[in-house]
Image (cartoon, rainbow, N blue to C red):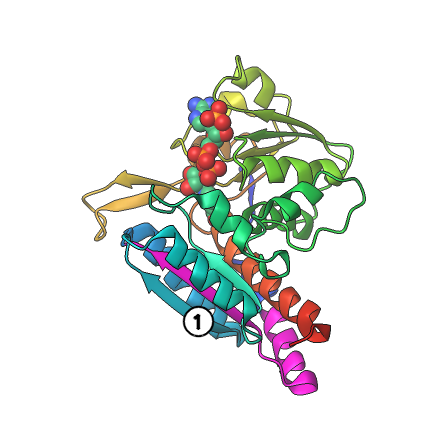
């Protein structure tokens, strides 16, 4: 039987409507409108689309967004100066610098220049590190991993006691996703490009998360019958029949794997909308946390 489709668009819409109600309450009770500064550097079309979608999503739930579009030639010092100004502003509760950055800019320094209370992307090492501390309160978990976990939880998938395999160990997706599943009592294995016999490992997974950026890498023979499969990958495949000249596919061969899995996320319409919804939620939380701050 074909797998149940975990509809990320519908779940994200439900999350956004909860956020919208909270934003309205915050405004009515405290006169505060959550604010997100987005910083886009250079002219990468995919990054521009991501930022545009994030700003549109902010507007839909009543979050203010302040957009900064900077040339690829901006110096690191100029960028750090802007971040310092945004950090001091009381109407900016969250700061997002769209990655990747031009090669002359040290991404780590930029991420660390965002104060952790405004780190709504959750990429600051202090926020990431807390994911690995048992029982710690994590102010802001990174948005895509948080979206994966939220999809599982809102779909009624039990995580505790299950065996989870995460494909990919990047600092912003694979590793934090694995830590978040571990914190929810899954038994977690991480695979990466140097892992031998990956299919043997993935076949042991009750929950399989694919985040490697390789189109349709996960095939049916790599999936345990009735596993739950979360596909984080977003890959562009050339497609002359599509007006954009490409279409998006995940890291999972959806058509094959849906015949084996018990539940699966599609691409698009799975993890992607959840990532943005979690950014909105982090921004709302940042505004709530800053109610008692000096501003
Ligand atoms: P990344 O930084 O390039 O990391 C890729 C990871 O996959 C690395 O750990 C790499 O291993 C591993 N890997 C690559 N090829 C592999 C292979 N053949 N077998 C096993 N492991 C392999 O990518 P990322 O930022 O984590 O993103 C991963 C995917 O998620 C991309 O398609 C990206 O577009 C997508 N994404 C989606 C969202 C969303 O909202 N849906 C958000 C962010 C990213 P090594 O560490 O050994 O190199």
Instruction: State left or right for residue 44 relative to residue 208.
Output: left
Residue wearing tag 1 = 66
Instruction: State left or right for residue 290 relative to residue 67.
Output: right
The residue under the point 66% across, 65% down is: 285
Question: Is ligand 1 within 8 Å of the beta carbon of the residue shown at mark 1?
Answer: no
In the depicted structure, whether residue 250 falls above or below residue 57: above
Quadrant of the frame with the C terminus: bottom right
Estimate the x, y position of residue 192 in percent, counting from the top left.
Answer: 52, 24
Estimate the x, y position of residue 280 in percent, counting from the top left.
Answer: 56, 64
Span of residues in magenta: 17-42
Q: Quadrant of residue 206?
A: top right
Q: Relative to the observer, which residue lies in front, 228 or 35?
A: 35
* Neighbours of disc 1 within 10 Å: few (<14), some (14-19), many (20+): some
Q: Residue furthest left?
A: 240
In the depicted structure, whether residue 138 falls above or below residue 179: below
Q: Residue furthest right?
A: 135
In the depicted structure, whether residue 160 falls above or below residue 187: below
Instruction: State left or right for residue 146 relative to residue 84.
Output: right
Q: Relative to the observer, which residue lies in front, 109 or 282?
A: 109
Q: Is residue 31 magenta?
A: yes
The residue under the point 69% across, 49% down is: 153
The residue under the point 52% across, 13% down is: 196
Q: Quadrant of residue 229?
A: top right
Inspect this view and state whether residue 87 appears.
yes
Q: Secondary structure at mark 1?
A: strand
Estimate the x, y position of residue 234 in percent, counting from the top left.
Answer: 41, 42
Q: Is residue 289 magenta?
A: no
């Amino acid at each position: 039987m074909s797998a149940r489709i975990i509809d990320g668009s519908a779940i994200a819409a439900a999350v956004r409507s909860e956020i919208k109600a909270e934003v309205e309450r915050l405004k009515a009770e405290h006169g505060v409108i959550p604010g997100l500064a987005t910083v886009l550097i250079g002219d990468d079309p995919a990054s521009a689309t991501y930022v545009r979608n994030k700003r549109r999503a902010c507007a839909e739930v009543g979050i203010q967004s302040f957009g900064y579009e900077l040339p690829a030639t901006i110096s690191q010092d100029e960028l750090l100066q802007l971040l310092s100004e945004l950090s001091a502003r009381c109407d900016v509760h969250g700061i997002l610098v769209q990655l990747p950055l031009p090669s002359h800019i040290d991404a780590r320094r930029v991420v660390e220049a965002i104060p952790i209370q405004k780190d709504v992307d959750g990429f600051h090492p202090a926020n990431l590190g807390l994911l690995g501390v048992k029982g710690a309160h994590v102010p802001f978990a990174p948005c895509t991993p948080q979206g994966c976990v939220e999809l599982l939880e809102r779909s009624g998938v039990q995580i505790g006691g299950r065996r989870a395999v995460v494909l990919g160990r990047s600092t912003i997706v694979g590793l934090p996703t694995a830590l978040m599943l571990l914190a929810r009592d899954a038994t977690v294995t991480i695979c990466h490009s140097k892992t031998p016999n990956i299919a043997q490992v993935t076949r042991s997974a009750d929950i399989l998360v694919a985040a490697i950026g390789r189109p349709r890498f996960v095939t049916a023979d790599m999936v345990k019958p009735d596993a739950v499969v979360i596909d984080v990958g977003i890959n562009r495949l050339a497609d002359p029949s599509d007006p954009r000249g490409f279409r998006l596919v995940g890291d999972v061969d959806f058509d094959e794997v849906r015949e084996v899995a018990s539940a699966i996320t599609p691409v698009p319409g799975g993890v992607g909308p959840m990532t943005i919804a979690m950014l909105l939620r982090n921004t709302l939380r940042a505004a709530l946390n800053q109610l008692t701050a000096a501003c």
